[in-house]
Amino acid sequence: MNENYFDIIYSVNVFQHCSQKDRFKYFQEGYDALKSGGYFIFSQFLMTNQNKNDSCWGIKDENGRGYTHFFNQLTECDWDYELNTELEKIGFKIIKGNVSNNFFGLILKKI
């Protein structure tokens, strides 16, 4: 993959089909592929303290992590604090984020 190549990476409804390990790996790869000042725009399911008890979570495990059914696929969802920590560790600056029920849209910038 070319590093520092793209101005914008855009992904909608993709990451909920991946494991958390793969999602975090793809965020790193996206960071590497972006030019300095480039944007990563994506959406995915996300758990927060506000939605943790909502009916949108088809299953919750013994640790409180939610899973949702998406096209007959059981999808593991990140907690907001896990995702924010990982994105900041990679080097992204969070420009804007919005949670609606369990769906999260985010705009990141490569610093």
Image: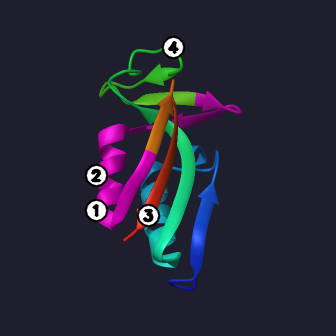
Q: Quadrant of residue 64?
A: top left
Tell which circle, 2 or 3, labels the residue nearer the N-terminal end. Answer: 2
Report the disc number at residue 85.
Answer: 2
Tell which circle, 2 or 4, labels the residue nearer the N-terminal end. Answer: 4
Residue 33 placement, left or right of 111? right
Q: Check disc 4: other Cα within 10 Å, few if <14, some if 14-19, many if 20+.
A: few
Q: Check disc 2: other Cα within 10 Å, few if <14, some if 14-19, many if 20+.
A: few
Q: Amino acid at mark 4?
A: Ser
Please name the residue that numbered disc 3 is placed on.
109
In whole angstroms, how far apart are the C-alphas of marks 2 and 4? 26 Å
Element at badge 2?
helix
Q: What residue is drawn where x is 49% and y is 53%? A: 107
Please name the residue that numbered disc 4 is placed on.
55
Q: Amino acid at mark 2?
A: Thr
Residue 29 placement, left or right of 93? right
Q: Is residue 101 above or below residue 32?
A: above
Region of the chain picked out in magenta, as a range: 69-96
